[in-house]
Amino acid sequence: MLPNTSISRRAFLGSLTTTVLASRTFSALRADEKPQGSERDFGGFTVAVQSYTFREFETEQALKRIRDLGIRHAEFYSKHIDPKSSPNQIAAFRRLCEEYGVRPVAFGVQHFSKDHDANRAMFEFARHLGIQALSADPDPDSFESLDKLCEEYKVAIAIHPHGPIGGGKLHRWYGSEVILPAVKDHHPLIGTCLDTGHLIRCAQMGKKLDPAAEVRAMGARNFGMHLKDHDNERRRDVPYGDGALDVTAILKALRDVKFKGYIAIEYEANPQNPSADVQECVDRFKKAVRKHS
């Protein structure tokens, strides 16, 4: 079952014909697929919201808040669409997204192991959802399976760093210096969804990382980004520019590597009412676009 009762109601009342999407190569959305005005405001980038930002809200409420921000794409996580949903339920979810003018572009963060059948199920979910990437935390022994599935489905695996994880340790995929050696000999659709907030947090462990340099290091293997700013003294997310993030430098780095993925605005502070701070992030992103243009 989907985690929102309104989806089940719509699924029950509507025709539940599954939309079967052909596998396609990873690329930016075609111009004729983009909502009018949205990408112009964002400098041609595909800008989304990571729905974890609205984790205290049910699916339809989250979609409304994403729409009200003027954002037309989303990377969803499991509260808002269960990856174990049936094709009919996924089709109902997609129709609900269409009602709010929000297009799914990615899902995650998803764990992958060497269990090829379980991995295939996630790629089938991605195919039915019509997304271009799965942000991921893969086990090192999963890559043989992922090589085959990326080739078959043409969906990217975008490894997501999580910075400090407690116990005096950094996440196993904390940045490019561990991700790139692990993926460089694997399928070209295995790369990163860098999380700028978690990259900034690494400084708490004495590992100072420059998010723009991380983008350049990963080059063509950048498939997504979670764009966050973080204040390490207060240890909380903040609107862009109130912490360590230089949005203009990020945009320049993304252009330099010819980035064709999605940028998901994510905000983990104030989960009961994040919209005002997220709107500030959106506005400051647009200002950075104008400055960089």
Image (cartoon, rainbow, N blue to C red):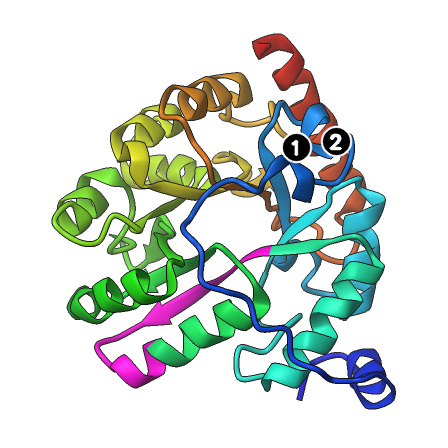
Where is residue 225? Give x, y as percent.
47, 41
- Report the disc number at residue 93: none
Name which residue lies at 79% across and 45% down. 275
Name which residue lies at 78% across and 34% down. 36
- Report the disc number at residue 239: 1
Locate residue 34: give its quadrant.
top right
Image: magenta residue range: 105-119
Q: Earlier in the sequence, mark 1 or mark 2?
A: 1
Type of amino acid under label 1: Pro
Label 2's element? helix
The residue singled out by tag 2 in the image is 280
**Are there few (<14), some (14-19), or many (20+) residues within 10 Å of tag 2?**
some
Name which residue lies at 34% across and 40% down. 202
Cβ atoms at labels 1 and 2 below 8 Å apart? yes
Label 1's element? loop
Name which residue lies at 82% across and 90% down. 12
Type of amino acid under label 2: Glu
In this view, 15 is above or below 288: below
